Image (cartoon, rainbow, N blue to C red):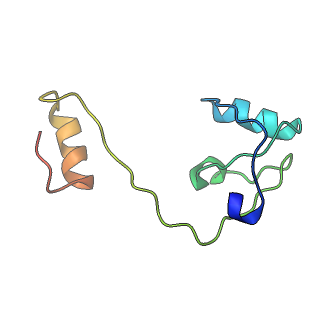
């Protein structure tokens, strides 16, 4: 982003999407959200634009080693069929 002349003056880390959205609503910066956050209802209090040209981000599944119970094992086998516990 620096190549385009955008360099943030401050960076704040927040772990709650509700708090992030409240900060954006109150004019305390901007944020990037996963699409699923707005999947149920388009917000009316903030402007939402789809970002173009980004590569897909990898997503990982994490669980305790040797701790996959049968239901978790079925889930893992569904989304990561080549993996083992």
Q: Quadrant of the C terminus?
A: top left
Residue located at (25% from left, 45% from top): 75
Q: Indicate the position of residue 59 as horizontal and vertical percent values.
A: 39, 51
Residue located at (63% from left, 30% from top): 16
Q: How many marks?
A: 0
Q: Can residue 1 be seen in this view?
A: no
In the picture as drawn, the residue positioned furthest to the bottom comes out as 53
On the rendered structure, is 44 left or right of 64? right
Q: Indicate the position of residue 20 as horizontal and vertical percent values.
A: 71, 35
Q: Taking 66 as reference, is 80 above or below it?
A: below
Q: In which quarter of the image is the N terminus?
A: bottom right
Q: Taking 9 as reference, is 44 above or below it?
A: below
On the rendered structure, is 52 left or right of 82? right
Q: In which quarter of the image is residue 73?
A: top left
Q: Taking 49 as reference, is 36 above or below it?
A: above
Q: Can residue 17 be seen in this view?
A: yes
Q: Indicate the position of residue 65 as horizontal and vertical percent values.
A: 16, 29
Residue located at (14% from left, 50% from top): 83
Please state which of residues 47 and 53 is positioned toward the viewer in this rendering.
53
On the rendered structure, is 40 left or right of 77? right
Q: Taking 26 as reference, is 4 above or below it?
A: below
Please state which of residues 47 and 71 is positioned toward the viewer in this rendering.
47
Q: Indicate the position of residue 67 as horizontal and vertical percent values.
A: 16, 27
Residue located at (14% from left, 56% from top): 82
Q: Quadrant of residue 23?
A: top right
């Amino acid at each position: 982003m620096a190549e385009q002349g955008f360099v943030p003056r401050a960076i704040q880390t927040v772990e709650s999407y509700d708090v992030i959205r409240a900060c954006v609503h109150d004019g305390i910066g901007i944020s990037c959200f996963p699409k699923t956050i707005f999947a149920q209802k388009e917000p009316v209090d903030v402007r939402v634009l789809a970002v173009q040209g980004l590569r897909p981000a990898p997503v990982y599944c994490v669980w305790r080693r040797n701790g996959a119970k049968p239901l978790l094992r079925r889930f893992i086998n569904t989304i990561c069929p080549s993996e083992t516990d």
